[in-house]
Image: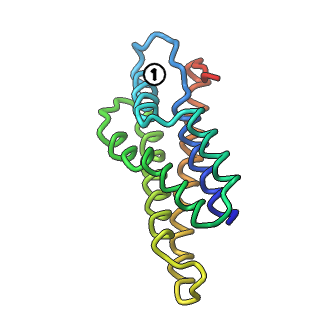
Amino acid sequence: MKFWQNLGKNLSKAALLLGSIALLAACSNPEVEDLKAISEAVKATGYSKEANQKFQDRLMAAKSEEEQKAIVEEMLVFFRPLPEKLNALNLQSEEGKAIRNNLSQGMGEMVAGIEKGFKLDAKDPNNAAAMMEAQKQMMSGQQKLMAAQTQLAAAAAKHKLKFEE
């Protein structure tokens, strides 16, 4: 049951960080323009600090694995369209493209792995290999999301951008 709680936290953490960059600098720099476009695409999902807190509270209060899975499914509604939105961006800088690629691929892998896991009965020993594969896919996605977070933080520092509270 803890698995779905942790998954929900990790999924939301990436979206909140990436959507919270406040681009207060003049946007004549292609790298800054790209960061702004990425931030706007993430914000356009509608996922917010308030929504995150409600999801996290519900995940912690959930009484069963089925209830937790249902809550994570609700969260996925925000994240499924993100890879496509990010891939549609016409970014100019290599920095922006690298962040976008890690974010898009990471979110895509997380969502795909979660959806695979949802289709499996984790208690059925015949599903152990498939469940492990779904978990590997989620972990790979999570690593790419963390790489995107690191890249974004470095880019924000480089361009003296601030994150919203």
Q: Measuring 32% from the left and 35% from the top, which residue is drawn there?
A: 89
Residue 61 place in picture, x, y as percent: 70, 53
In the rendered view, would you say 162 is above or below 68? above
Q: Residues within 10 Å of mark 1 (few under 14, many from 20)?
A: many
Q: Nearer the viewer, residue 66 or 116?
A: 66
Q: Which residue is mark 1?
A: 32
In the rendered view, would you say 37 is above or below 58? above
Colouring of the image: rainbow
Query: From the image, which quarter does the N terminus lie in?
Result: bottom right
Q: Measuring 51% from the left and 31% from the top, which residue is drawn there?
A: 19
Which residue is at the far bottom? 126
In the rendered view, would you say 164 is above or below 54? above
Q: Amino acid at mark 1?
A: Val
User: Quadrant of residue 116 in the image?
Assistant: bottom left
Query: From the image, which quarter does the C terminus lie in?
Result: top right
Q: Measuring 53% from the left and 79% from the top, which residue is drawn there?
A: 121
User: Quadrant of residue 57 in the image?
Assistant: top right
In the rendered view, would you say 151 is above or below 33? below
Which residue is at the far front? 63
Residue 120 place in picture, x, y as percent: 49, 76
